Amino acid sequence: MSSSTCSNSTVKSHQNWLFVTVYSMVFLVGLTLNVTALVIFFRNTKSRSHTTMYMVNLAFADVLLVCTLPVRIYYHAGLGCLHQRVCDFAGVILLSNMYGSIFLLTCISFDRCVAVCFPLSSLVREGRKKAWCVCLGIWILTLGASLPIYLKPSNRNNSSIVHTMNMTMNTTRQCFGAFPTYATQAGVLASTIVFGFGIPLTVMIISSWGLIQALNKSTAAQTSELVDSGRIKRMIITNLAIFLLCFLPYHVILVLLHMFNNSSMSDSMLTVYRYSLMVACLNAMLDPLAYYFATETFRKKMVAEAVRKKCQINTHSSDGNNRSRTPLTT
């Protein structure tokens, strides 16, 4: 049977309008905000900092993710079946974006922390100049780690999972409804939890704590009216909260799926797993709000860009009016 064929009943079983609604919202809002952020970043290359390098890559990763969401919307709307390769491609992009975002968000927090806590260190300054190397390494690592999940043949035809989930071969290949066999293997799961989530979370917590401590000790932050330390602290805490909101549920569910994969709870846990992936996708919409539009520097760049466009429009309009008023000569 072709991997793109299925029955009408299978198509109907995919329907979930909550998924359709949330994915549609993330697609529209996430694409608009991230493309806007990329335009602002690339139009202000002269003032680009080392942290901006991580932000550009984060925005690009989010754009890649939201561009695959129409595939998930089509699937969950029950409009028809998709070829397995299309589903696998969308899955690779989702996982690459998830862990790419985790590592990039960690780098942003760490970069901000060392820049504030060690502003005069030559070692820190030289290290921050390697941001593009770090970003390249993150892309290679995340893509390389995500591909085996979808390329390994045994992931699609695991007989124990078929027996446990009471599925036929046709339904185990139902695109985004498959059991995450490879990701819940003990060795893979341990590596994912430790290196893909635990260490980045620890670094983010320490970096956030370091930034808050630096603000508390800063005389300028306490006395200057130009530095709103309370607002900066709220932004730091918000960034950490968004990180936990988007990525903690997914990793908790992976552990639970590994623990209960042979029990009667497997079916319910698999449903929760799909919702945790949906929650992880919210990151593509929340990143721009937390890391770009929340910063005063970015807002100033955005206002400057809007003023520049308005001036261009007014100039073109003025030129057009002047040409229309030019008297005809014979």
Image (tube, rainbow, N blue to C red):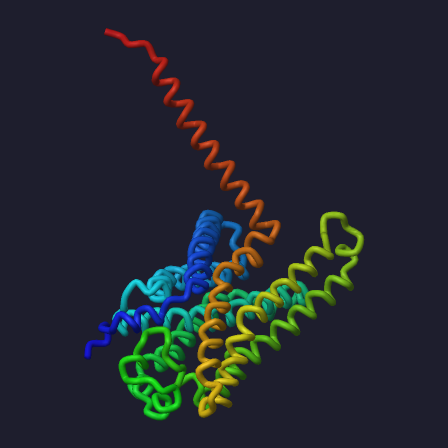
Of 115 and 140, the residue lying toward us: 140
Residue 76 vs residue 5: left or right? right
**Place of residue 42 in the rendered image (x, y in percent of width and height, measured from the top left):** 44, 51
Hey, which quadrant is residue 82 in on the image? bottom left
Residue found at x 43% / y 27%: 315
Q: Is residue 119 visible?
A: no
| Figure quadrant of the C terminus | top left
Q: Is residue 292 above or below residue 210?
A: above
Picture coordinates of residue 312, whole percent (x, y): 44, 32
Point 77% across, 63% down: residue: 216
Rendered view: 154 above or below 276? below
User: Quick check: 60 left or right of 250?
Assistant: left
- Identified at 75% across, 56% down, the residue is 221
Q: Position of residue 326 (x, y in %)?
A: 34, 13
Which quadrant of the figure has residue 121?
Answer: bottom right
Q: Is residue 252 visible?
A: yes
Q: Residue furthest left?
A: 1
53 sits left or right of 160 in the view: right
Please tell me which residue lies in front, 137 or 38.
38
Determine whether 1 is above or below 281 in the image. below
Residue at image x 39%, y 23%? 319
